[in-house]
Image (cartoon, grey):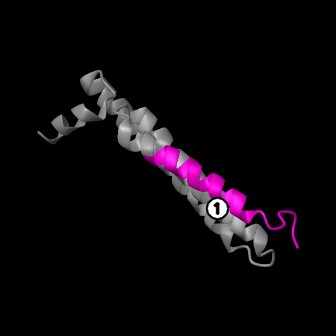
Amino acid sequence: MNILGNVVEHYVLLSAIIFTVGGIGFLVRRNVLVQLMSIELMLNATNLTLVAFNRRHVLDMNGQVFSFFIIAVAAAEVAVGLAIVLSFYRLKQSVFSDEADQLRH
């Protein structure tokens, strides 16, 4: 038995709630910065699930390895996403995603 005991379900439920909040935040909000933060919430919810299941299987470290990869992808997403948002703001003086379709022209 590990430190979590039999409460992995609680962590999975918390992760599902956090992921749902992130998904709703991404779909509802128009601000690109809030959408980026919502994506980060969804990635952190996935990390919580992976680490919780990894604690159940103590000898297998795959959950933590995947979690490190997700953290690296999240850091790259923030760097690229903020660069795109900054260039879009300099061009249009707005951070609303509704106006991003004008970049196709």
Residue 58 appears left or right of 27:
right
Q: Position of residue 47 (x, y in %)?
A: 63, 58
Eyeballing the image, is 52 above or below 42?
Answer: below
Which residue occupies 38% across, 34% down? 29
Could you tell me if residue 71 is visible in this image?
no
Dividing the picture into quadrants, the one containing residue 16 is bottom right
| Image spot of residue 83 (x, y percent) | 40, 37
96 or 88, nearer to the observer: 96
Residue furthest to the left in view is: 105
Residue at the spot x=24%, y=36% of the render?
A: 100
Question: The magenta stretch spans which residues?
Answer: 1-23
Describe residue 18's horizontal placement relative to residue 61 as left or right: left
Label 1: element kind: helix
Quadrant assignment for the C terminus: top left
Vertical position of residue 71 compared to residue 64: above or below: above
Q: Residue at x 82, y 63 (%)?
A: 4
Above or below for 71 versus 9: above
Q: Which residue: 80% across, 78% down?
A: 59
| Residue 37 locus on image (x, y percent) | 50, 39
Pointer 1 residue: 49
User: Quick one: label 1, few (<14), some, or many (20+) residues within 10 Å?
Assistant: many
